[in-house]
Amino acid sequence: MRPTVHDIAKEAGVSLATVDRVLNARPGVREKTIARVQEAVARLGYVRDAAAANLARGRFYRLAFVLPEGPNQFVETLRAALLEACATQVADRASVKVVTTPAQDPHAVVRALRALNPRRLDGVAIMAPETPQVRDAVARLKEEGLAVVALVSDLPNAPRDRFVGIDNVAAGRTAALLTGRFAPQGGEVLVVTNSLRSRDSLDRRLGFDQVTATDFPKLSVLPTAESYDDPARMEAVAFEAAMSRPKLVGVYSMGSGNTPLLRALRRSGRLDELVVIGHELTPVTRRALIENEMAAVISQDVGHLARSALRVLRAACDAAPVFEAQERIRIEIVLRENLP
Amino acid sequence: MRPTVHDIAKEAGVSLATVDRVLNARPGVREKTIARVQEAVARLGYVRDAAAANLARGRFYRLAFVLPEGPNQFVETLRAALLEACATQVADRASVKVVTTPAQDPHAVVRALRALNPRRLDGVAIMAPETPQVRDAVARLKEEGLAVVALVSDLPNAPRDRFVGIDNVAAGRTAALLTGRFAPQGGEVLVVTNSLRSRDSLDRRLGFDQVTATDFPKLSVLPTAESYDDPARMEAVAFEAAMSRPKLVGVYSMGSGNTPLLRALRRSGRLDELVVIGHELTPVTRRALIENEMAAVISQDVGHLARSALRVLRAACDAAPVFEAQERIRIEIVLRENLP
DNA sequence: TTGTACGCGTTATCAA
DNA sequence: TTGATAACGCGTACAA
């Protein structure tokens, strides 16, 4: 059996309360007594029982997630993962509210953040493009004492406590490496996304360009085409490129909108000669991998994302350290054969 | 605040003990009372506080890990991950003993398993090749009432409760897909491992052959070369192949021994024209990726492996269900650009 | 068949 | 500066 605070108290010849004061670095204990207790702790190899501590503290974490709502499969799976995580151990002693905001409207997320009642909340996870207004809203929440984490898309210039998601520059670099390796003959690469407003798309494009520039001189990357969340526009842009650019060898899809993209490429009759790489595992991209329509999908485990955000938020609420190794979200490469 | 057993008791008009009996499906309660309690549970949306339950129960899990010991970086990192997991929340209310056995000696692991005292233990995780003797030893442990999980390399014919690790057939298939994509010109592929005794190597080879046969007819895969954990032998075999086979385009290394392998290929002067794919991220393979000496590494997250094994063992001890989504170990593809 | 009372390891409140 | 003592939510002897 592991030693408890009782054992420490006995060993140090003090009361439980004093042990507690020392363990939690509370004031009102003499230097000498502190030393005695700490020696006892070291001698017996005491480690606090986190479960019992939480139970006694009666700590309850009131958390909120602000997610975009749109024609976006990824967010749907993320929400599902979040609810599943809540249903299990991870969300013990916590209540989680999920708020969705229209993705197209940049002001909606700000309104949603402003609508949050800071006194009824301990922490917030936010997935949104970084705008000055969002930065202000985040700053206000921080001032009210809330823990704030950026989710999936970082808010590097806002006072968030942490970013939970992948390194999107590295993700873009990975996509470029795959494209270059899968299309050694070289040619043109189309890059598409719904919007470059999001930090993640911006970073991915940056990384993609870095690697193509240094390692794959035979690849020439076209300017980013934005669909602004309009499927018709995505389809038109992709179709146009496939038909008018004979030297096209690859397509890198940085955001959502893979359904209209694939439809256009299929229609052009050139899909089987193109290396198509996209992001996030959804029913659409999964099917495309199986059918050999997409060569690879770069993804982040939504379950991990959800659980990590919850753990990190709780740690931030307590100003406690996080277990770094467990919270680093991996850039996963999914091919037809390692589909989960 | 979440409802507690007290709230349920009040709502149903019974005592705490009765609520407990219903919740834990213990006998001695009238049908009608059971129904009343269950209604109250449903009405208030009660969910048990697992931490408090374990605290009250005073449950303590005595676990052991049996790992091979050899010139194997992967096992070292796994052991480190295990110790790190123990040091954090995952191993709360559990003691973990790690036993190592010489990897070369197939009887050593059996001796180690026999040396385990089943009465001082609740569960065991085993990483070992499957032999009839190992099967017998596992059967004996199960008969004694222990929870047993196979780790990294499955023991499909032993009565283990569960396998914690990747699907190695799929891992082999993934390696083949990468090889075929990275070497579209085709040619010969050398496959090496330390030993085909291990189930994991066997499965990987199987998967590799499946995909090369159906999808990459231009690839011809050579018979598996075994090094029997002898670095000199590995180096000799690889050097010989590189020098005598002009049509060689790739090497698939299914086990450990990547140091002598790479040394041989370097010496042959043909490393930069070969697609080399190996398993497990170690200092050696990490460096090889950065230097562009290896094209890809297929790996499993040792941290995840360790935490998953601990969670699964505990669940098995309690005959409790596991949260499947969290325990599925992914087949990770690591390239130079998505190195963690 | 049902209820009472205590303990698990920690924190927190009050009094000394 | 210290110490008793009562919670926290649940499990479990033991009594009714």
Image (cartoon, coloured by chain):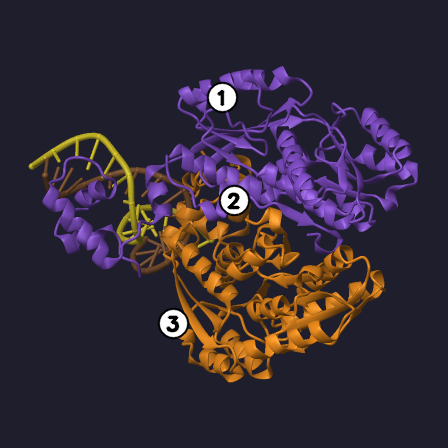
Chain colours: A orange, B purple, C brown, D yellow
Q: Quadrant of the N terminus of chain A?
A: top left
The residue mark sitting in front, 1 or 3, is: 1
* Residue A66 position within the rendered picture, expressed as x and y whole percent measured from the top left: 47, 71
Where is mark 3, residue-wise? A120
Q: What chain is tagged by disc 3?
A: A
Dot 1: what SS?
helix
Q: Are the residues under badges 1 and 2 in a single subunit?
A: yes
Q: Which mark is residue A280?
A: none
Q: Depth check: C8 or A93 in front?
A: A93
Compared to residue B295, the image places residue B61 above or below, namely above
Q: Amino acid at mark 1?
A: Val
Dot 2: what SS?
loop
| Mark 1 neighbour density, 10 Å: few (under 14) some (14–19) many (20 or more) | many
Q: CA distance from mark 1 to mark 2?
A: 23 Å
Q: What chain is tagged by disc 2?
A: B
Residue A30 visible in the picture: yes
Where is mark 1, residue-wise? B138
Dot 3: what SS?
helix
Residue A227 visible in the picture: no
Give the mark, 1 or 2, whose residue is nearer the N terminus.
Answer: 1
Q: Are the residues under badges 1 and 3 in a single subunit?
A: no
* Residue B197 position within the rendered picture, expressed as x and y whole percent measured from the top left: 65, 23
Where is mark 2, residue-wise? B328
